[in-house]
Amino acid sequence: MPLNFSDTPQGPPDPILTMGYRYREDTNPKKVDLGIGAYRDESGKPYVFPVIKKAEKMIVEDLDLNKEYPR
């Protein structure tokens, strides 16, 4: 017997997708898309936040840090 979803109420809008729609509609030239986690600059190249670069540098330089993945 095939399923019939015609009587199923529609759920609320997905907050992540809604944020993407709102981003595209925003005309502010300084907007930053934080929806998916793949941040891009004006030319479409990946943008890495300075705090991420700082954290990566700290991890690489800390020779006492256990960098093994947990089991």
Image (cartoon, rainbow, N blue to C red):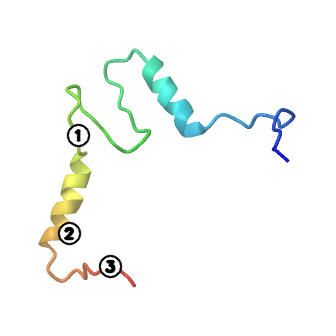
| Badge 1 amino acid | Pro
| Left or right for 51, reference 12 | left
Hey, which quadrant is residue 47 in on the image? top left
Instruction: Decide: few, some or many residues near mark 3? Use Cα within 10 Å; few <14, some 14-19, many ≥20.
Output: few
Q: CA distance from mark 2 to mark 3?
A: 14 Å
Q: Secondary structure at mark 2?
A: helix
Q: Is residue 54 above or below residue 42?
A: below
Q: Nearer the viewer, mark 1 or mark 2?
A: 1
Question: How far apart, in angstroms, are the residues tagged by discs 1 and 3?
Answer: 26 Å
Foreground residue among 53 and 17: 17
Label 1 sits on residue: 46
What is the crowding at mark 2: few (fewer than 14 residues within 10 Å), some, or many (at least 20)?
A: some
Q: Which mark is on residue 69?
A: 3
**Residue depicted at 25% across the width and 78% down the height:** 67
Farthest residue, direction top: 27
Label 1 SS: loop
Q: What residue do we see at 40% from left, 38% from top?
A: 34
First in residue order: circle 1 vs circle 3: 1
Q: Which of the two discs, 1 and 2, labels the residue nearer the N terminus?
A: 1
Identify the residue at horizontal 37%, vertical 17% (top origin): 28
